[in-house]
Structure formats: structure tokens, C-alpha cells
Amino acid sequence: QVQLVESGGGLVQAGGSLRLSCAASGSIFTINAMGWYRQAPGKQRELVATITPDGTTNYADSVKGRFTISGDNAKNTVYLQMNSLEPEDTAVYYCNALVLLYLSREPDDYWGQGTQVTVSS
């Protein structure tokens, strides 16, 4: 019903930058929020950043000042600009969207397939 397609992961040296993109498609009536989560090996999935259609953002403390989330409402797309990357940022990054479908009463969470980000020291 909803597909989230991510792109932009890869391998980068510490101090470098990467930009992730995630486009949502399907029977979308409205998107209440989009965001990025990450999961490192042996760790639980954690919030990185979220954004609502009015531009309200929320960041994990560990990425504040280094990562910037932005969105294009017309394209149902969210971006994550990651600067000053550290080895501790190495993880699989997942796109998330809270979506209200046509004919649905409540929004549901949808997830992308994940994209690997590896930061070498």
C-alpha cells in the first residue's frame, strides 16, 4: 500500500558527508511525519531525526549540529544530510513514514528496506 524507497548510503571516511533520500509512494492520503532511524550491529533501532509537514524537526542528541533533515511535501520525500560523520554513525539507516491511507481511519507506520552507512576511521 505504501512503498518507501531509500537511496544515498555508502562508505565514507570520518569527517565526510552523505545525503540520504527516501521517497514514499502508494495510496497516500496524507503523511503525518517522516523520519530516519538507524540500527547498528548488536544494538536496538534508534531515532535519528523526524520531520512533520509543517517543518517541525526532532533530532537525537548524538546527531544534533551534524545532521539535517528536510522534506519535500509535494514529492512525499525526506532527506537526511549527514555531515562530520563519525565511525559511531555506522549503521543501517531506515526511512519511516506515518501515513494515513485513503479510506483509512488511523495512520500506520511504514518502513523502508534500509540503506547501509559505513564510516571508516
Image (cartoon, rainbow, N blue to C red):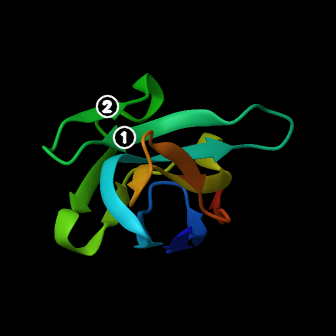
Tell me the residue that label 2 is attached to.
58
Q: In this view, does 48 lie to the left or right of 30?
A: right
Residue 121 in view in this figure: no
The residue sitting at 56% across, 70% down in the picture is 9
**Residue 36 or residue 1, whichever sits in front:** 1
Q: Determine whether the residue tagged by mark 2 lies in a helix, strand or loop.
A: strand
Residue positioned 41% across, 56% down in the render? 103
Q: Which amino acid does label 2 sit on?
A: Asn
Q: Position of residue 48 (x, y in %)?
A: 48, 38
* Furthest residue toward right: 42
- 56 is higher (above) or lower (below) than 16: above
Q: What residue type is labelled 1?
A: Thr
Q: How many residues crowd mark 2 within 10 Å: few (<14), some (14–19), many (20+)?
A: some
Q: Residue at point 45% right, 43% down?
A: 107
Q: In this picture, is 47 found above or below 8?
A: above
| In this view, 67 is above or below 93 | above
In the image: residue 85, left or right of residue 77: right
Quarter of image, res 56: top left
Residue matched to label 1: 50
Q: Which of marks 1 and 2 is nearer the N terminus?
A: 1
Q: In this view, does 94 lie to the left or right of 100?
A: right
- Bin the neighbour count of mark 1 within 10 Å (Cα to Cα): few under 14, some 14-19, many 20 and up: many
| Residue 105 coordinates in the image, percent (x, y) | 42, 42
Q: Residue furthest left?
A: 54
Tell me, yes or no, whether the two marked residues, 1 and 2, touch with CB atoms within 8 Å: yes
Residue 116 % position (x, y): 67, 64
Residue 28 image-quadrant placement: bottom left
The N terminus - image quarter: bottom right
